[in-house]
Amino acid sequence: MSVAPRLIKNSLLALSLLLGCLLASTFRARSQPLSLDTSFNPLMNTGAVVYVVAVQPNGKILIGGTFSSIGGVSVANIARLNTNGTLDTSFNPGTAADIGYVGVITVQDDNRILVGGSFFSSLGTATANLARLNSNGSVDSEFDSNLAIDGVVNAIAVQSDGAIVFGGGFSFVDGLPRRSIARLHANGTIDTVFDACVASGAGSGATGIGIRSDGSVLASGGNFTFNTGAYRTGIALLTNCGEVDISYAAQQPGIDIGSTAYTLLLPSDGRQGVSGRQLQLFPGYLS
């Protein structure tokens, strides 16, 4: 028997065994791991979409997206659920992000909550596209109320000193050129020292942000072109001041040009992981 038919035969055998295991599993108890918990049902409005979920240390669940009610109670685009899926009515963001959508939630060590996306407040109670809430959902009055970002925010990460690095599809922050990646001080004012000098970015700009132990910043996305002439496809490493580190992923293109890395993960071992659409990593790209 040639190699190809043998591989097909072995694959069919493995598939048969897998199907057998799946069928057998249907007779196990309903409480088996990863089975649907039918008691967890937030009862969101028809057409609701949740884009991001963040679980707090106490088990409560922050959700963001585009929705208007949970359990019959009006709540717009960001909410907190109790551990059983019911609405936590003690968390009340009001109109902080009631127009548009929330796509990213990051909880700070002090339990204040950063939210990003493409949104604004119909009553002007919070800054557009990136805002900070207190632990009870109210808008944080200590966060710069004049923050102006001209495009969507896709990712937010907080440095050990409280500085806020964020990425998205924007070109200006507080009137200063800051394409795709920028950093704020802990109070929400722009950090003018940090300048990634991104000349252009494909698609929605930066899609993921990660802070390494040495303070350097990883950003995922499409094709980044920098003012220095350097370019990076899929992921770029920036120094603590924002300059691109050309020694990182020096072999370019790192992923096939035209693709986008949508997610960035920093495991505890210091390696990096990306995922995206039609993503092809070239040898030696990440380490």
Image (cartoon, rainbow, N blue to C red):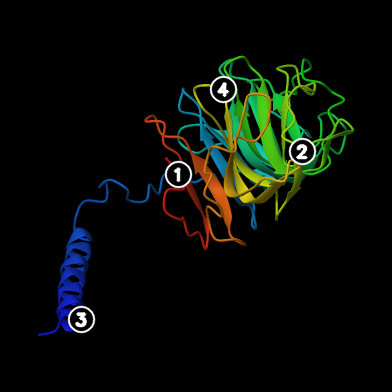
Can see residue 24? yes
| Number of disc labels | 4
Characterize the local packing of mark 1: few (<14), some (14-19) or many (20 or more) Cα atoms within 10 angstroms: some
Can see residue 44? no
Q: Which of marks 3 and 1 is in front?
A: 1
Q: Which mark is residue 176?
A: none
Characterize the local packing of mark 3: few (<14), some (14-19) or many (20 or more) Cα atoms within 10 angstroms: few
- Dot 2 falls on a residue whose secondary structure is loop
CA separation, marks 2 and 3?
Answer: 54 Å
Residue positioned 70% across, 24% down in the render: 133
Residue ID for mark 1? 286
- Dot 3 falls on a residue whose secondary structure is helix
Cβ–Cβ below 8 Å for labels 4 and 3?
Answer: no
Residue ID for mark 2? 129
Residue ID for mark 3? 4
Residue positioned 50% across, 29% down in the render: 60
Characterize the local packing of mark 2: few (<14), some (14-19) or many (20 or more) Cα atoms within 10 angstroms: many
| Above or below, 233 relative to 183 | below
Question: x, y (%) of residue 138?
Answer: 72, 23
Cβ–Cβ below 8 Å for labels 3 and 1?
Answer: no
Residue positioned 58% across, 19% down in the render: 111
- Dot 1 falls on a residue whose secondary structure is loop
